[in-house]
Image (cartoon, grey):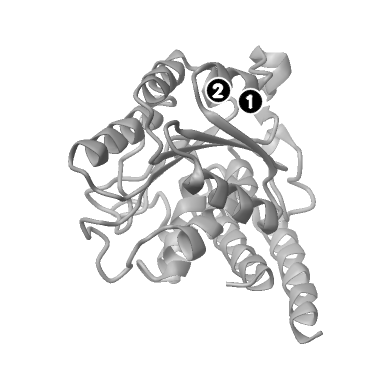
Amino acid sequence: MTNLELQKTANEVRKGIVTAVHSAKAGHPGGSLSAADMFTYLYFEEMNIDPADPRKEDRDRFVLSKGHTAPGLYSTLANRGYFPVEDLKTLRHLGSYLQGHPCMQETPGVDMSSGSLGQGISAAVGMAVAGKMDQKDYRVYTLLGDGEIQEGQVWEAAMFAGANKLDNLVVIVDNNGLQIDGKVEDVCSVYPIDKKFEAFNFHVINIDAHNFDEIRAAMKEAKETKGMPTAIIMKSVKGKGVSFMEDKAGWHGKAPNDEEYAIAMADLEKIGEELAKGGMA
């Protein structure tokens, strides 16, 4: 896909996020929106996957370690064809297969159920080890929040991955700088993130989370890196695309009301119109 096509798709993913969280009257829009471009690149460009065969043995794996941003993953999967986009409106509803955290038994395209923060990267490391043991060439990707890496389990997993030279593993950190209680640097600073992963024998790449050229280059570099896992630290804007949500910690885990929903969708519609003009140029 071209960058313009990816931008258009990511904008549709953002519409799905806002719609799902509004319908649920609960959820986590901020970190879902900040990661929407990376979700889009992974599922529409990077990973070897097939929506018609979600469990195919040689597929690449993705683990959403920051599981509360399930609306972002669900919207991406829906737009990729794993299930109807209309079903996003059932988020967190009783009986829906789209609950607050992803469930691999219930949701097509989900490779690992998400639990407490910090656990996902451990599962991803296990998948990468299994790939090496079975001599398979699939790759494993996992997305973490910058607040999440305050968890000690993250660094146990990183230590193991580095020590075992898991070059089939890509750890992505969504560094939007905010967590539920405020700025990450004020709550419990995780900086410098890149130097920490380097200390655990990772190849580290710093990128702009909203620049598809940089995302593409980082993924190419990760594939070419041998003998060590890769960590992509992406600087992002929490709530990206929705004017009143951008860079606001209060939108970590809050649903928009009807009026806010209308404003958010108008923001995204405007972005879509601008991208359409770019497509005609």
Which secondary structure lies at badge 2? Answer: helix
Mark 1–mark 2 distance (CA, rounded to whole Å)? 5 Å
Q: Position of residue 84 (x, y in %)?
A: 39, 71
Residue receiving disc 1: 194
Q: How many labels does the image show?
A: 2
* Label 2: few (<14), some (14–19) or many (≥20) C-alpha neighbours in 10 Å: many
Which secondary structure lies at badge 1? Answer: helix
Q: In this view, does 151 lie above or below 271?
A: above
Residue 211, quarter of picture: bottom right
Q: Position of residue 13 (x, y in %)?
A: 56, 62
| Residue placed most toward the observer, 110 or 221 | 221
Q: In this view, does 250 lie above or below 136?
A: above
| Residue placed most toward the observer, 13 or 123 | 123
Q: Say which residue appears at 35% left-offset and 35% top-offset.
A: 124
In this orientation, does residue 30 appear?
yes
Of the residues shown, which amino acid type is indicated by label 1?
A: Asp
In this view, the residue farthest toward the bottom is 280
Q: Where is residue 141 in the image (x, y as percent from the top left)?
A: 43, 43
Q: Say which residue appears at 81% left-offset and 84% top-offset.
A: 281
| Residue placed most toward the observer, 254 or 202 | 202
In this orientation, does residue 23 appear?
no
Residue 146, quarter of picture: top right
Of the residues shown, which amino acid type is indicated by label 2?
A: Phe
Residue receiving disc 2: 197
Q: Say which residue appears at 22% left-offset and 49% top-offset.
A: 105
Q: Position of residue 256 (x, y in %)?
A: 64, 50
* Label 1: few (<14), some (14–19) or many (≥20) C-alpha neighbours in 10 Å: some
Instruction: Name the mark on residue 2.
Output: none
In the rendered image, the quadrant that contains the N terminus is: bottom right
Q: Is residue 59 above or below residue 278?
A: above
